[in-house]
Amino acid sequence: MKGGSPSRGRSDGARRDAAEALAIAALGFLASDPEQLGGFLAATGIGPERIREVARDPHFLAGVLDHLAGDERLVLAFARTEGIDPSEFVPIVIMGRVPNALVVNPKLPLNSVAEVIAYAKANPGKLTSATQGNGTTSHLTSELLQMMADVKFQHVPYRGSAPALTDLVAGSVDLMFDNLGVSLPLVKGGQLKLLGVATPKRMASLPDVPTIAETLPGFESAAWFAIVAPPKTPQAVVDKINADVNEALRQSDIVQRLTQLSAEPIGGTPQATAAYMREEIERWHKVIKAANVKLD
């Protein structure tokens, strides 16, 4: 990835910092799939030692992804390694969101969110819901729909999206709530049916795909990736990094890459980032508590 042109008034070093920050955060997005992660590391040259290094350097960043309360294993494992309390991280910017989506095996004779809910009500526990694992985004999204629709699925946890999607395509399980950036190629290839996206409004790139909220008002779920700084990072450093990353998010190549991943660039101020993260933590904590979700 690369940042903007010199004419924008940022130094080459600042642009590299912003681009590397985006790349580091993307590691979290890929962490659930070892094959993707390995390929990403090889392509970027960013190794595990660089990830550990950022926690000790207040002028660099740690990337965290997903619902901080929902799939907190990456954050906790990383923080414990460095002796850092995750709650002490300083929010800087939300870089992007990848919506979750309800995908089903094409042979399943259900063609809408409403039909899935109706079938689940008539047949409690019969539909099998694959997830990336206990406490992951897909698991919590499935639990959220079950709570809001008052239905029950049979939970089938996997270790990551890849094995779950493999079984979903094979027909071993019925449905899955997955990050759209991962499952969309399978939808386009006819291997899965996309019944709805978990965005507040229909996506411009998929205008014919309904939102789940059209059936369950208020339903929303996205994997988001943010940049946070180590504890006690000076505000001036936070503000500068925020400005650099916001500029990077306006660059056409980065926007294009995020769009290819079905991600929506976000940006914004550190204050807006902190507020968004608090809201997400509170929202998903309620789901975790109500569904009694336990991590592996």
Image: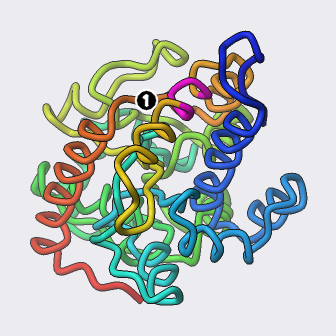
Quadrant of the snapshot with the N terminus: top right
Crowd tier of the residue under label 1, counting other residues whose Cα lies within 10 Å: few below 14, some 14–19, many 20 or above: some
Q: Position of residue 146 (x, y in %)?
A: 19, 58
Element on which disc 1 rests? strand
| Residue 189 drawn at (x, y percent) | 74, 35
* Amino acid marked by disc 1: Ile
Horizontal side of residue 270 vs 66, given as left or right: left
In the image, taking residue 49 as reference, residue 221 lies left or right, namely left
Q: Position of residue 200 (x, y in %)?
A: 27, 27
Q: Quadrant of residue 289?
A: bottom left
Residue span colored magenta: 244-248
Residue at x 24% of width, y 39% of height: 271
Nearer to me, 89 or 123:
89
Considering the image in quadrants, where does the C terminus appear? bottom left
Quadrant of residue 60 within the rendered picture: bottom right
Q: How is the image coloured?
A: rainbow
Q: Which residue is mark 1?
A: 266
Of residues 23 and 220, the one drawn nearer to the viewer in this rendering: 23
Residue 191 falls within the magenta-colored stretch: no
At which x and y percent is residue 202? 37, 19
Position of residue 119 relative to residue 52, above or below, is above
Quadrant location of residue 80? bottom left
* Magenta part, dominant SS: helix
Image height of 38 relative to 224, above or below: below
**What residue lies at 56% left-to-right and 32% top-to-bottom?**
244
For the point 43% across and 39% down, the residue is 99
> How many numbered circles does the render carry?
1
Does residue 2 appear left or right of residue 66 in this picture? right
Q: Residue at x 51, y 41 (%)?
A: 241
Q: Is residue 183 left or right of residue 92?
A: right
